[in-house]
Amino acid sequence: MVARLFGALGAVALTLSTVPLGLAADQQAGLDLEPVTAVEGITEYQLDNGLRVLLFPDRSRPQITVNMTYMVGSRHEGYGETGMAHLLEHMLFMGTPGHPDIMQEL
């Protein structure tokens, strides 16, 4: 799952990095995506797999920056799911009996 997400983001970043800076936003990347919404220069797209992409062109720098946000906090838990984000946080940073040092394994 994570590898597919990184792959999708990498493909989007690679596609966008090959576009000349002078093109209009609707000509970029040659992708057939319709914007979901646009606010103050930030355009949101949704890929077929549900991934939401926020595009904020900044032509003042010749580079691309990718930020990823995972909607997994307690705010995103449903009824009966309380504590899941906290549990995953503990598993990631404190490990489990079978995997005591997760960071070393990564």
Image (cartoon, rainbow, N blue to C red):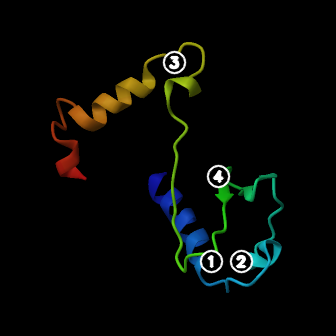
- Are the residues at dot 1 and dot 2 in contact (C-beta closer than 8 Å)? yes
Residue type at the position of mark 3? Glu
How far is disc 3 from disc 4 in space, using C-alphas?
A: 22 Å
Task: Return the residue at label 4.
Answer: 51
Q: Which residue is mark 3?
A: 81
| Label 4, residues with CA under 10 Å away: few <14, some 14-19, many ≥20 | few
Q: Amino acid at mark 2?
A: Ala
Residue farthest to the top, as pictured: 80
* 89 relative to 12, above or below: above
Tag nearer the camera, 4 or 2: 2
Circle 1: element type: helix
**Amino acid type of the residue tagged 4 in the rendering:** Leu
Q: Secondary structure at mark 3?
A: loop
The mark tally for this picture is 4
Q: Could you tell which of marks 3 and 4 lies nearer the N-terminus?
A: 4
Label drawn at residue 15: 1
Is residue 103 shown left or right of residue 20?
left
User: Whole-Å distance between the Cαs marked 1 and 2?
Assistant: 6 Å
User: Is 45 situated above or below 97?
Assistant: below
